[in-house]
Amino acid sequence: MAQKKLTRADLMSAFWRYVFLFQCGWNYERMQSVGYCFSILPVLKKTRPDPEEFKEAFITNLNFFNTNPVVGAPLIIGAHIALEEAGASLETTEGLKVGLMGPLAGVGDTLVWALYNSIIFSIGSVMALQGNALGPILVILLVFFPYLAVRYWQFFWAYNQGTNIVAQLGSGAIQRITELATIAGLIVVGGFAPSIVRLTTPLKWAREVVVRGEKVTQTVEVQPQLDAIMPYLLPVLVTFLAYWLLKKKGWSPTRVIVVLVIIGFVGGALGIFG
Amino acid sequence: MLTALVLAIWAYLCIYDILGPCFFLGFRPLIAGFVAGILVGDVQTGMMVGGTLELMALGVYTYGGATIPDYTVGAILGTYFGKAVGFETGVALAIPAALLLTQVDIVNRFLNFVFVHRADRYAEEGNATAFDRMMIFTSHIIWGLSRAIPVFLAVAFGEGLVKGVSSFFEANPWFAKGITVTGGILPALGFAMLLKILPVEQYPAFLLIGFVMYAYLKMPLVGIALAAFAIALVFQQLKYRPKEA
């Protein structure tokens, strides 16, 4: 590897730039592009003293970029810095960014948002609803320290692994982490969905039955009948409806919301659900 | 007016936090509502509104930059108005506010293209200083104001409107019923979004295992999460076991 061109201060500068402004300026056109460029810029200044070369790297690093900001982005930036320091070409570093941002977005979204956050926030919310202020405080602590630690660790791990990272992650490690996270994620979602989505029906009808020769009016409630088929049948159906519209019909989340609001509001107002 | 300003600043901070620091995840309704509760001097209402909305929005995140209802602003406004008229009305106001502001987020994410175009220009000039200045001072302004301004306007001028809305709720219980049911099924979207990014068709069995653990075995959620981790580990150990000679 070429001689070290970067000091610890340069690395920390990139890290703090990433921490404080990574997704600022996010836009539909190139998503996290300006934040990424902002993070890597102090490194580019050091590794490319020639103004023309620097300009070229500056322009290139404004390309489209999007991944999970917590698990994913620091790893890519760390690895990118190592390659940059070793004198890699812009094609190589762009290849690293494009190759890793997709898979790591999947891992990061599943690990951080679907698993970790769903767990801590559901616990915190239940405590808050019981009037316990420790709930939200606990959540803040469980965000602040682990997030910062995990980002710092990824960044320096990826930097220290240097050029090996692509080979390492490529050799099946990233697929295995993805698989682990998605399997755990699926199980958790399977349990979380019926625990959170609420939909029941108060519908009932009266029927006359003959008990020991006497006519008796009996009320039949629909909900226990549904529960006998499968508990949480209605929440499961509405979740699959939303999934089907999103995935198979390609609807935007906003359009799905409109449908859910109509079902919920009309159903609730008419007394079909509630 | 002071409250409006304080809450607007808090809304700005909540959104800025997810754009970078992620120090407290203020964009989550639990946190946004809790701190808004402290700011208006009614922590209980803040926690009730924030906790209720949080459970509705659990799993709802902006995967790949998708727009979602603005539960952040919803929680802040719900807390502020809920303080006077009770947290149920606060929640009932928070949901339409969150849905209304969905459109604002789309406009915000669109308008931000100005930064990338200015960045292109600075890059052509090789002007890193100007780029840094833009990033530090202005790159979060459209994001922040798109939340701060609606909060400020609603708190500063929305009192009469909210009084009208809450008396309408009292006079028309069917309306409140509709809102309550809607709140119950909105989380379906969050889970649908999660399922969309997960390989459901490849591994349908795992989804079913999670469902059975909750619906039939009545396991608490933390237990399900631990079991999920264990099952995933075992699955991989079996799958990647070195072939025996």
Image (spheres, rainbow, N blue to C red):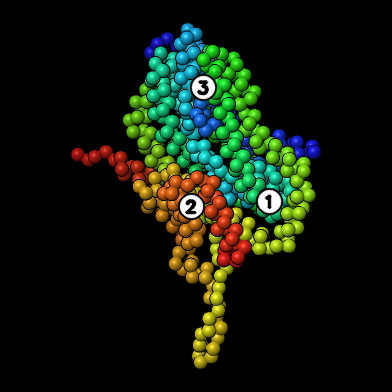
Q: Is mark 1 on a helix, strand or loop?
A: helix
Spatial CA distance of label 3 from label 1 is 40 Å
Query: Do badges 3 and 2 share one subunit?
Result: yes
Label 3 Cα neighbours within 10 Å, binned few <14 / some 14-19 / many ≥20: many
Q: Which amino acid does label 1 sit on?
A: Leu
Residue indicated by mark 2? A242
Q: If the image is split into quadrants, where does the C terminus of chain A sit?
A: bottom right
Query: Do badges 3 and 1 share one subunit?
Result: no
Residue indicated by mark 3? A37
What is the x, y in percent for residue A102? 42, 33
Q: Answer with mark 3 or mark 2, whichever residue precedes in sequence.
A: 3
Q: Residue at x 59, y 18 (%)?
A: B132
Q: Which residue is drawn at 57% across and 47% down?
A: B57
Q: Which amino acid does label 2 sit on?
A: Ala
| Left or right: residue A158 compared with residue A140 | left
Q: Which amino acid does label 3 sit on?
A: Cys
Please tell me the numbered disc located at residue B119: none
What is the x, y in percent for residue A15? 54, 23
Spatial CA distance of label 3 from label 2 is 37 Å
Please tell me the numbered disc located at residue B93: 1
Res B72 visible: yes
Q: What element carries label 3?
A: helix
